[in-house]
């Protein structure tokens, strides 16, 4: 059995034939991105070879192309996903609009209940998270945005299954018999090995248990229960309009779900979930005490959808076609232009561009129609795009979130900044740091640091706290909104400090990027002439990553 991290993802195409016009390098590039995602964001070239079955030279060219696109960076030999790759998932989430329209309601419910609340959409026979409002607890419960779970092991699954066609049920049964332990779902622990439809001694749910509805979540029977049980839970979800997960994923984890319907079609838009732990609520408890409040919140969400204004025009897509030609000229054989062009197609979609015709995709990307068409055919084959024959438009599918999103959802500013600090320190040969105000606001905390090789160096460790005053360069940048600050010998004699601000998506200063040098090494003028431009450039790079990463998920500052 191959390692869990190297198995294909669950929504990979069925055995259906690859269309003749599909772009092979694009299929392979997607396989590499999905393997990296399943592995948590970092993989060696040989692990990528094993996971994708591709030749080493192909893996190398794909990684070089993704690196050129800044979707991965090379850390030694390892390929590492960068926050930039989140622009693919962002395109899907923006086009979907549900996170923007309903996210703050989910957050408010989480605050009200002091429990985690999530929103999930159907992804074929799985469910995928599109929003997470999590509580900070010692025992963290939550999945990440983009994580895919097998429908039958969740609370929302039976609600989505009420809309399944015969073909959906067949696909689900095929998957269950091929992968009874859920090895194609890297986000969940494997299910105990039992055959589908095997009667389970411990499972009261194989029988109609009208008298004891507390057990309808299939308690403690983590995926090992017979397939009939899911059919049964689906029938009940259809009748009741809610659904439970009583420790189907993991002992202790319980959830209750209610459907959010699209007011125009009456069909499921998404499912809202309250997630807890048996130490706080049993599943029956969740249903009795929290379900009524969840349903009230869902009614408000549906009203929000009814009243939602038309989508605001989002940022224009970058139109990368000319860029890819230039990269091809520069990198030659190592750059796979058809992969870069194909990935560009996904970024054509967005908030007011949820459904696009082929002509619109070609126009937004600057690609020739034939190129855009072949990319769309490839994506349709990979279940990344759906085609609506009625109005001849294409839309992104939830599976786009499997292209790098989950490992980066929830990344912190210090983690996101670290490779940029390393590059900056390399360039200026000085120690560089990130600092931010603490939650209470009365202190400044150093949150990241990369040291330069000098015998004489400023030794401020990560975690060091200073009073939040404008007595220091960092303090002035964080508190007084200056463009940059240069300070001489304020921390210590002989130390010269330069700091520049980092801004969030709304323009607020959220951190300072700073470097300290010795007065003997650099004059104030030298700091302004050589260090300041380097710091400003790095700040821009960090901000670009921060803005991409924080579009749909909060990025902690510390
Ligand atoms: C979650 O949001 O973490 C969640 C939702 C539904 C489940 C399990 C977990 O059934």
Image (spheres, rainbow, N blue to C red):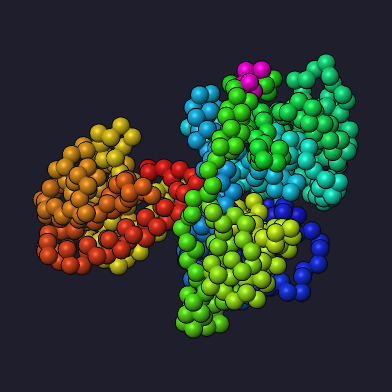
Left or right: 485 as drawn, with respect to 394: left
Q: Nearer the viewer, residue 90 or 413?
A: 90
Give above or below for 305 relative to 349. above
Where's residue 507, x and y in %?
Answer: 33, 49
Farthest top residue in view: 211
Locate the N terminus and report the quarter of the image it occupies.
bottom right
Identify which residue is drawn at 71% across, 28% down. 242
Locate the C terminus and report the quarter of the image it occupies.
top left
Where's residue 28, x and y in %?
Answer: 66, 68
Identify which residue is drawn at 66% across, 60% down. 394
Per the picture, the main secondary structure of the magenta-coloured stretch is helix
Where's residue 365, x and y in %?
Answer: 54, 69
Q: Nearer the viewer, residue 280 or 133?
A: 133
Where's residue 112, x and y in %?
Answer: 50, 24
Give above or below for 538 relative to 414. below
Q: Is residue 61 magenta?
A: no
In this orientation, does residue 89 appear? Answer: no
Give above or below for 360 relative to 253. below
Magenta span of residues:
288-292
Identify which residue is drawn at 41% across, 42% down. 556
State the image quarter where residue 486 is shown.
bottom left
Identify which residue is drawn at 36% across, 47% down. 506
């Amino acid at each position: 059995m191959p390692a869990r991290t190297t198995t294909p993802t669950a929504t990979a195409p069925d055995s259906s034939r690859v269309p003749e016009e599909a772009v092979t390098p694009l299929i392979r590039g997607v396989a590499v991105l999905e393997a990296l995602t399943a592995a948590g964001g970092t993989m060696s070239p040989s692990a990528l070879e094993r996971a994708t079955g591709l030749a080493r030279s192909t893996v190398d060219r794909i990684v070089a192309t993704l690196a050129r696109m800044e979707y991965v960076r090379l850390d030694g030999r390892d390929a590492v996903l960068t926050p930039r790759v989140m622009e693919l998932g962002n395109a899907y989430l923006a086009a979907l609009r549900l996170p923007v329209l309903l996210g703050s309601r989910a957050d408010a419910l989480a605050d009200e209940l002091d429990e985690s609340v999530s929103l999930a959409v159907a992804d074929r026979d799985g469910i995928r998270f599109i929003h997470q409002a999590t509580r900070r607890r010692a025992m963290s419960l939550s999945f990440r945005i983009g994580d895919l779970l097998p429908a039958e092991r969740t609370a929302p699954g039976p609600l989505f299954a009420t809309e399944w066609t015969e073909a959906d049920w067949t696909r689900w049964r095929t998957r269950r018999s091929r992968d009874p332990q859920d090895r194609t779902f890297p986000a969940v622990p494997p299910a105990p090995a039992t055959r589908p439809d095997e009667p389970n001694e411990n499972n009261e749910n194989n029988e109609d248990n009208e008298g004891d509805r507390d057990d309808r979540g299939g308690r403690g029977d983590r995926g090992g229960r017979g397939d009939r049980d899911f059919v049964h839970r689906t029938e009940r979800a259809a009748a009741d309009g809610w659904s439970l997960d009583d420790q189907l994923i993991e002992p202790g984890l319980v959830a209750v779900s209610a459907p959010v319907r699209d007011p125009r079609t009456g069909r499921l838009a998404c499912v809202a979930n309250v997630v807890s732990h048996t130490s706080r609520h049993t599943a029956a408890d969740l249903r009795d005490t929290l379900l009524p409040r969840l349903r009230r919140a869902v009614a408000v969400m549906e009203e929000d959808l009814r009243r939602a204004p038309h989508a605001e025009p989002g940022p224009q897509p970058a139109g990368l076609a000319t860029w890819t030609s230039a990269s091809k000229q520069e990198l030659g054989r190592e750059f796979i232009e058809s992969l870069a062009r194909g990935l560009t197609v996904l970024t054509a979609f967005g908030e007011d561009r949820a459904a696009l015709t082929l002509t619109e995709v070609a126009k937004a990307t600057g690609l020739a129609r034939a190129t855009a068409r072949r990319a769309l055919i490839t994506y349709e084959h990979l279940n990344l795009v759906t085609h609506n024959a009625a109005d001849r438009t294409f839309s992104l599918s939830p599976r786009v979130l499997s292209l790098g999103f989950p490992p980066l959802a929830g990344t912190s500013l210090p983690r996101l900044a670290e490779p940029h600090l390393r590059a900056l320190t390399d360039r200026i040969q000085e120690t560089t740091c990130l600092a931010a105000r603490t939650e209470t606001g009365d202190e400044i905390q150093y949150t990241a640091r990369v040291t330069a090789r000098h015998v004489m160096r400023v030794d401020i460790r990560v975690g060091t706290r200073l009073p939040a005053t404008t007595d220091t360069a960092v303090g002035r940048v964080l508190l007084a909104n200056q463009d940059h600050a240069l300070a001489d010998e304020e921390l210590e004699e002989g130390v010269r400090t330069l700091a520049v601000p980092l801004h969030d998506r709304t323009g607020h200063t959220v951190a300072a990027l700073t470097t300290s040098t010795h007065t003997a090494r650099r004059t104030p003028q030298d700091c302004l002439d050589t260090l300041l431009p380097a710091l400003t450039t790095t700040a821009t790079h960090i901000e670009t990553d921060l803005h991409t990463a924080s579009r749909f998920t909060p990025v902690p500052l510390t």
